[in-house]
Image (spheres, grey):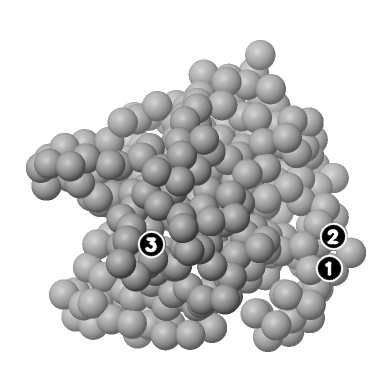
């Protein structure tokens, strides 16, 4: 089986990462990568890691051809403007932006500050989190990638939320530390190197848009508050969530929830070591991988449960989970193209 893939907006970080993964996939054939700015150039000019991996050149978006799978890596808001045109050119449309992650027009309005341009399509895309949406993915023709912070936070909290272990009367706080690549390829004042280097800067104390996905994907959770800080890594998200368990819930209950939910998951690993320096999730060991590492510690005196989860924001946080979801949609091995185990040191 060979499935043809075209990537629109392939010169950005998300598009380039999907391109890298797809080129190493045994069942996918990348037939086109588009870029308005770099049309005609070899893709390795923009993505030097792909030198001698592929001979592809960027095509202009106006020259987009049909393919079995079309991956949209356009900036947020752009796919919604031309979704009908792109969907007509493929069997499966995968969106890596935020355009179709939410199912509720009201939630979009509240968190994004405006009306969605295509509210009729909200809910038509399957949220690309196989750990929670695997039953909906086989045969899916519209797939919406999740946010990177949302992916780490949802995977970290889902087992205890869905098991009903958290105290609904006590709010939870989710704090995320995020690498610079999450801001995308286009530089801005806050990502200029002299401003970005060395920082541990809180950039979203409140009102981070990924909170919308936490509310959507974690029904029954206590009220959650999300704060995000920029740190001096290129890749990676580390989420630390502070939530409270119900009276009588102990460590065994929490551990059973995580093992029950993730025991057979190919890309979620529980980090529960008692010795050594790698006792908690660390984005450093996840660079380039599709793993989400999850750990926790429960304070029995206060009932405070500290959940830690880490991902590579460009792989498990963006292109990797989208490819994982696409594998399920196409009936392929869910792990295909995603076997890189990371590096250490």
Point out which mark residue 25 bears. Answer: none
**273 left or right of 117?**
left
Query: What residue does disc 2 label?
Result: 121
Label 3: few (<14), some (14–19) or many (≥20) C-alpha neighbours in 10 Å: many
Helix, strand or loop at label 3? It is strand
- Find out whether the residues at labels 1 and 2 contact each other: C-beta distance under 8 Å: yes
Q: Is residue 109 above or below residue 340?
A: below
- Find out whether the residues at labels 3 and 1 contact each other: C-beta distance under 8 Å: no
Point out which mark residue 305 bears. Answer: 3
**79 left or right of 253?**
right
Helix, strand or loop at label 2? It is helix
Query: What residue does disc 1 label?
Result: 118
- Residue 137 found in image quarter: top right
Q: Nearer the viewer, mark 2 or mark 3?
A: 3
Point 47% across, 31% down: residue: 263
Q: Tell me how many marks there are.
A: 3
Reading the chain from its start, which is encountered first: label 3 or label 1?
1
Q: Quadrant of the N terminus?
A: top right
Q: Is residue 236 above or below residue 265?
A: below
Label 1: few (<14), some (14–19) or many (≥20) C-alpha neighbours in 10 Å: few
| Residue sitting farthest toward the right | 120
Q: Nearer the viewer, mark 3 or mark 1?
A: 3
Label 2: few (<14), some (14–19) or many (≥20) C-alpha neighbours in 10 Å: some
- Percent x, y for residue 32? 60, 38
Point 44% across, 48% down: residue: 254
- Percent x, y for residue 249? 46, 55
Distance from disc 2 to disc 3, alpha carbons, whole Å, reads: 37 Å
Point 84% across, 60% down: residue: 121
Closer to the camera in the image, 326 or 150: 150
- Percent x, y for residue 300? 32, 61
Q: Quadrant of the C terminus?
A: top left
Point 53% across, 56% down: residue: 165
């Amino acid at each position: 089986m060979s499935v043809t893939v075209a990537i629109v907006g392939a010169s950005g970080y998300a598009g380039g990462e999907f391109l890298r993964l797809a080129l190493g996939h045994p069942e996918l054939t990348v037939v086109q990568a588009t870029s308005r700015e770099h049309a005609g150039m070899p893709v390795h000019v923009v993505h030097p890691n792909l030198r001698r991996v592929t001979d592809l050149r960027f095509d202009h978006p106006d020259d987009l051809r049909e393919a079995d799978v079309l991956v949209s890596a356009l900036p947020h808001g752009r796919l919604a403007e031309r979704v009908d045109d792109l969907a007509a050119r493929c069997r499966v449309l995968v969106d890596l932006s935020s355009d179709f992650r939410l199912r509720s027009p009201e939630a979009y309005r509240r968190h994004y500050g405006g009306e969605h341009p295509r509210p009729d399509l909200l809910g038509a895309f399957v949220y690309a989190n196989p750990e929670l949406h695997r039953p909906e993915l086989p045969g899916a023709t519209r797939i919406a990638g999740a946010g990177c912070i949302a992916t780490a936070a949802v995977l970290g909290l889902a087992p205890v939320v869905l098991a009903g272990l958290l105290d609904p009367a006590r709010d939870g706080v989710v704090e995320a530390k995020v690498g610079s690549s999450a801001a995308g390829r286009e530089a801005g004042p806050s990502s200029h190197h002299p401003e970005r280097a060395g920082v541990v800067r809180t950039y979203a104390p409140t009102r981070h848009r990924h909170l919308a996905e936490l509310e959507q994907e974690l029904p029954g959770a206590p009220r959650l508050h999300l704060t995000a800080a920029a740190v001096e890594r290129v890749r990676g998200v580390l989420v630390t969530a502070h939530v409270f368990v119900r009276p009588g819930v102990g460590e065994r209950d929490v551990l059973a929830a995580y093992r029950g939910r993730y025991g057979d998951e190919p890309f979620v690993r529980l980090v529960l070591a008692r010795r050594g320096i790698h006792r908690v999730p660390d984005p450093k060991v996840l660079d380039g991988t599709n793993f989400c590492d999850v750990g926790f510690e429960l304070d029995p005196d206060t009932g405070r449960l500290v959940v830690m989860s880490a991902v590579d924001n460009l792989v498990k946080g963006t292109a990797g989970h989208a490819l994982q979801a696409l594998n399920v949609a196409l009936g392929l091995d869910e792990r295909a193209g995603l076997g890189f185990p990371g590096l250490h040191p």
